[in-house]
């Protein structure tokens, strides 16, 4: 079945220049393998579409039950250059939590 990512994880985001950083943290340890399987760099890049001009890197943090994403060229030049409403990428984590992922009955 499909669920919103927000049902099994929370997230934080910020910036470094023109790069957004999004951390996605599983609520429960058993949800971490679902994050690893479903929330790939390719899916994150596709989900944000034209907002991410560069590559998306994913880093796995199994000891924290978390994934960290770097979205290159995603903030319109960065905080001091961008005309975007969210030039620091603070709302990008909330946006990502709306992404739908596939889970099996026993994974919730």
Image (cartoon, rainbow, N blue to C red):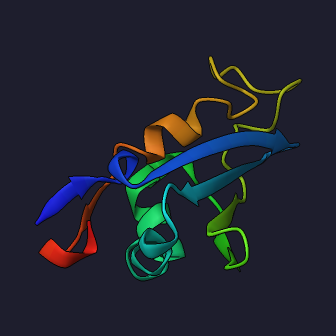
Compared across the picture, whether 40 is left or right of 34 comes to right
**Residue name at image x 58 percent, y 53 percent:** 52
Compared across the picture, whether 77 is left or right of 99 comes to right
Residue 57 is situated, as x and y percent measured from the top left of the image, at 68, 73
**Residue name at image x 76 percent, y 39 percent:** 14
Q: Is residue 82 above or below residue 28?
A: above
Residue 19 is situated, as x and y percent measured from the top left of the image, at 77, 50
The quarter of the picture where the N terminus appears is bottom left
Quarter of the image where one finds residue 87: top right
The quarter of the picture where the C terminus appears is bottom left
Residue 96 is situated, as x and y percent measured from the top left of the image, at 46, 47
Q: Is residue 38 above or below residue 97?
A: below
Of residues 28 and 75, which is closer to you in this image? 28
Compared across the picture, whether 105 is left or right of 102 comes to left
Of residues 82 and 88, which is closer to you in this image? 88
Residue 4 is situated, as x and y percent measured from the top left of the image, at 28, 49
**Residue name at image x 37 percent, y 75 percent:** 38
Quarter of the image where one finds residue 34: bottom left
Of residues 58 and 50, which is closer to you in this image? 58
Compared across the picture, whether 106 is left or right of 63 comes to left
Of residues 29 and 90, which is closer to you in this image? 29
**Residue name at image x 70 percent, y 37 percent:** 76
Q: Is residue 5 above or below residue 65?
A: above
Q: How many marks?
A: 0
């Amino acid at each position: 079945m499909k669920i919103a990512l927000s049902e099994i994880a929370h997230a934080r985001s910020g910036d470094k220049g023109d790069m957004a950083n999004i951390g996605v943290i599983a609520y429960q340890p058993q949800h971490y393998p679902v994050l690893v399987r479903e929330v790939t760099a390719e899916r994150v890049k596709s989900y944000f579409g034209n907002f991410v001009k560069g590559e998306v890197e994913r880093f796995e943090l199994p000891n924290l039950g978390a994934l960290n994403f770097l979205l290159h060229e995603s903030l319109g030049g960065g905080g001091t250059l961008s005309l975007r409403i969210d030039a620091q990428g603070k709302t990008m984590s909330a946006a990502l939590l709306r992404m739908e992922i596939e889970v099996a009955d026993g994974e919730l």
